[in-house]
Image: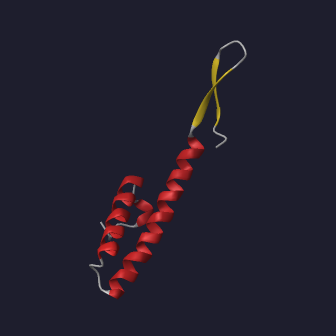
Amino acid sequence: MADTPIKEMSFEAALAELENIVEKLERGDAPLEESITIYQRGAKLKAHCEGKLKDAQMKVEKIVLDGQGNASTADFDG
């Protein structure tokens, strides 16, 4: 999966890979050069996940009730 371009990854795939990177770095299993490389990919994955979350948040609508109890939707004002 590390060969998959990040921009093509779903949120779930990017998060799973990011979790694997964090675990590997925490265990200290990788030599220094590999650690630097996977850390850099992890930073890009984190940014990608944050972007996906922001996009999703902007699409969320909230349900509002008017004074008569009628439901409608309005943009999420987060």
Locate residue 71, reporting x and y percent.
62, 19
Locate residue 60, reporting x and y percent.
56, 39
Kindly identify the residue that appears in the image at 37 percent across and 53 percent down: 12
> Residue 21: which quarter of the image?
bottom left
66 left or right of 43 in image: right
Question: Depth check: 71 or 30 in front?
Answer: 30
**65 versus 59 height, above or below:** above
**In the orientation shown, which residue stands out farthest toward the front?**
27
Kindly identify the residue that appears in the image at 41 percent across and 76 percent down: 39
21 left or right of 59 in image: left
Locate residue 27, reporting x and y percent.
29, 74
Kindly identify the residue that appears in the image at 47 percent across and 64 percent down: 46
Kindly identify the residue that appears in the image at 50 percent across and 54 percent down: 52
38 left or right of 56 in image: left
**36 versus 43 height, above or below:** below
Locate residue 70, reporting x and y percent.
65, 15
> Residue 7: which quarter of the image?
bottom left
**In the orientation shown, which residue stands out farthest toward the left?**
29
Which color mode does the image show? secondary structure
75 left or right of 23 in image: right
Q: Which image quarter holds the N terminus? A: bottom left
Q: Which image quarter holds the C terminus? A: top right
**In the orientation shown, which residue stands out farthest toward the top?**
68
